[in-house]
Amino acid sequence: MKLHGVRALSALAVASLALTSCGSSDQGGGGEEKFTQVKMSYDNDDFMNQMTWMVADEKYWPELGFTEPADVTASDEYMAALTGGDVWIAQGESDAVWAAMAQGSVPLKIVGVIKDTEAWWLGVREGVDPNNLAGLKISGGPIGDRNVKVAEKLLEERGVDPKSMDFVSIPGGSDDRLTALLAGQIDVAVLQPRHEAPLVENGGQMIEKKYQEVPQETWVVREETLENHKDEVCAYIEGRVEALQYVSEGPDHTANRDAVLEIVRARGLDPSQAEIDEWTQEMSNQLALDGGSSLESFEQWNQDMIDNGNVPEGFDWKEHADFSCLTAAQEKLGLKPDPGNITG
């Protein structure tokens, strides 16, 4: 197993990725040689993200043909790694995936979902009156990030005019927003459920806790990879879905938790007690345990992406999706196909 803690790539590295040949011999996604290793880049190496692929790599991928330990990289530039050929599959925020599909320089296909529920959680720092937010500093991430729109919708639901707030652009993800919030750089932020414990410990509070069904984070490959290496793409997805089923067994999803913790600790991942305590909530309200999301949620997400300007009017997401591998895996494991066998 190779796990890199890279959070961003230099401009030179990104440029190099763009020039990488899709037919390289390092199993980046092109050529005819069968893949024997999962090479993936994803956007966030928090505990749940790492745990789910580690279980697949430990228990399922070897039996499905991946004889080499997975090579996984966490990077803000996960889409550049995919389109440049450094990896053959990526996992990340669907707004970035949609934008890359619409840009079209490298044909892409969505092949599955890792998170099918979006947490609309709004937190405030210590000393902030949740009933008097007008004029305060708020962040949903960098300019154009979907969470900026989430912040606006949550404010409107609370009767607060978003225009009365001072929106601050904070690069990175929700962890970075939490850091800025606790440092007093902002007063309000769109956060994730895992942030509640540290926020409360530092005197803050969550003032909104809502969930929306959306294909929030997806798996995506280059179209040529799906054409030339469909068996390996299907094996990847089958292993991921099997792992998701395993880690979520039991009425409260904890039947195999101890066994999973043994696996990840043996691989050098040592989750905090707070991260472990989030287990049931993450399984119930974040992870797509069948690797999919409803057709209706995809349609609504696509419309949101159009409304937000991530993709042009009339963008047809189905032309950029192929759920044949996902459907096969779901049927093999006795799961209801979701969203169905869409092959754009």
Image (cartoon, rainbow, N blue to C red):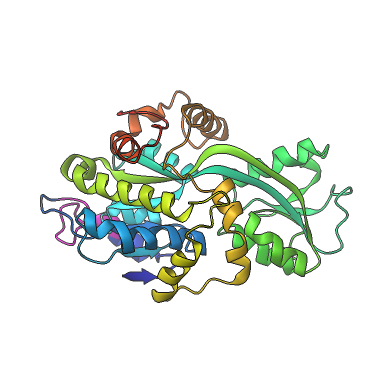
Residue name at image x 40 percent, y 65 percent: 9
Rendered image quadrant of residue 342: top left
Instruction: Say which residue appears at 54% left-offset and 51% top-offset.
Output: 283
Relative vertical location of residue 182 with respect to residue 251 in this rendering, above or below? below
Compared across the picture, whether 336 is left or right of 143 comes to left
On the question of residue 289 being in view, the answer is yes
Q: Depth check: 194 or 227 in front?
A: 194
- Image spot of residue 250 (x, y percent): 52, 51
Q: Which residues are magenta?
A: 17-30
Q: Report which quarter residue 206 is drawn in.
A: bottom right
Q: Can you give x and y, in whole percent of width and height, for residue 179 in the image?
A: 66, 67
Q: Residue at x 18, y 62 (%)?
A: 26
Residue at 79% from the left image edge and 58% from the top image edge? 205
Residue 233 within the magenta-colored segment of the rendering? no
Where's residue 201, x and y in %? Answer: 76, 69
Quarter holding the N terminus is bottom left
Q: Which quadrant would residue 331 be assigned to in this image?
A: top left
